[in-house]
Image (tube, helix red, strand yellow):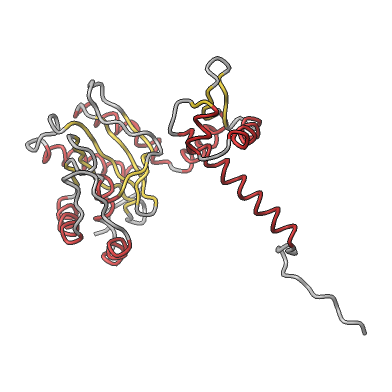
């Protein structure tokens, strides 16, 4: 009886040099295309040369990748200005995140109510690793106000929402964070000493709301509180931000209670709760 041919694991294609080289080129092209989308997401429009320069890619490669992205409506070029920007299809893809996260729709009325009651910009952010990502904002009408782009990331230790979420983590997870991440200084007020941060987190946990006291941007304060999911986990946060001249030290306690109340209402509205 002749020996049966060697069987490969199901679902895994046979690898050869051609396949590996092809996959490597495909992955590189995909990474370059994604880098273009990320750069464009931070601008309202860029010329081909400016986009290529910021992405660190040759103009010819950038133009070729933009052609593919444009064919799928992920990017678009304005014929008048010759500037490239994010396309309509990217919005549709992004809306899938909103559909999956019911908190975004549920939060809007409460965020608007908080903005109108305090006169300051209200933000919502979620945790991604040890960074927060802003996912929603209701701006106030003041000429000088806080502004964060949707999708913008901030260090967890120098953010009101970040510290509110960090305070609700287990002691072991906080230890991992402090042992593996540097506490980068952004202003003279940034907390960069681990024990000082631990004390601050303990205070936040006790009172239920946090303060970014000019720790990320000079002259700007933020008051925030955590939002809990159905498992009692702090998975998002809500904050109000504004100039220190308006968010005075005297106002912070009352603003903190108001933000905490809004976060608690939002937790309950979306089926979440704080573990006892």
Closer to the camera in the image, 226 or 91: 91
Taking the view exactly as shown, the residue that stands out farthest to the top is 80
> Is residue 268 placed above or below 171 in the rendered structure?
above
* Image point (31%, 65%), residue name: 176
Q: Which quarter of the picture shows residue 6?
A: bottom right
Looking at the rendered structure, the number of numbered marks drawn on it comes to 0
Quadrant showing the N terminus = bottom right
* Picture coordinates of residue 116, whole percent (x, y): 23, 26
* Picture coordinates of residue 253, whole percent (x, y): 11, 41
Please indicate whether residue 178 sits to the left or right of residue 219 in the image: right
Closer to the camera in the image, 66 or 250: 66
Please indicate whether residue 83 sits to the left or right of residue 242 in the image: right
Q: Which quarter of the picture shows residue 73?
A: top right
> Is residue 245 placed above or below 238 in the rendered structure?
above
Closer to the camera in the image, 23 or 212: 23
* Image point (87%, 82%), residue name: 3
* Picture coordinates of residue 92, whole percent (x, y): 54, 33
Taking the view exactly as shown, the residue that stands out farthest to the left is 250
Closer to the camera in the image, 180 or 140: 180
Quadrant showing the C terminus = bottom left
């Amino acid at each position: 009886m002749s020996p049966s041919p060697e069987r490969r694991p199901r679902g895994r294609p046979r690898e050869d040099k051609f396949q590996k080289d092809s996959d490597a080129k495909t992955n590189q092209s995909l990474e370059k295309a994604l880098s273009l989308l990320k750069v464009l997401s931070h601008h309202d429009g860029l010329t081909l040369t400016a986009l290529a320069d910021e992405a660190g890619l040759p103009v010819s490669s950038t133009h070729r990748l933009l052609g593919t992205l444009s064919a799928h409506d992920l990017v678009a070029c304005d014929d008048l200005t010759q500037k490239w920007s994010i396309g309509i299809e990217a919005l549709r893809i992004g809306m899938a995140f909103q559909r999956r996260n019911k908190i975004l729709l549920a939060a809007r009325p409460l965020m608007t109510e908080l903005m109108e009651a305090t006169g300051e910009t209200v933000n919502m952010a979620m945790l991604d690793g040890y960074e927060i990502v802003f996912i929603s904002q209701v701006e106030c009408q003041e000429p000088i106000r806080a502004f964060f782009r949707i999708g913008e990331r901030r260090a967890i230790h120098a953010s009101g929402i970040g510290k509110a979420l960090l305070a609700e983590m287990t002691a072991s997870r906080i230890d991992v964070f402090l042992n593996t991440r540097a506490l980068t200084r952004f202003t003279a007020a940034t907390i960069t000493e681990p024990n000082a941060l631990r004390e601050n987190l303990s205070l936040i946990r006790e009172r239920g709301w946090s303060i970014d006291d000019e720790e990320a941007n000079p002259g700007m304060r933020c008051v925030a509180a955590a939002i809990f999911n159905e498992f009692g986990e702090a998975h998002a946060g809500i904050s109000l931000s504004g100039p220190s001249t308006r968010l005075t030290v005297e106002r912070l306690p009352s603003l903190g209670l108001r933000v905490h109340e809004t976060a608690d209402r939002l937790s309950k509205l979306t089926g979440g709760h704080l573990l006892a």
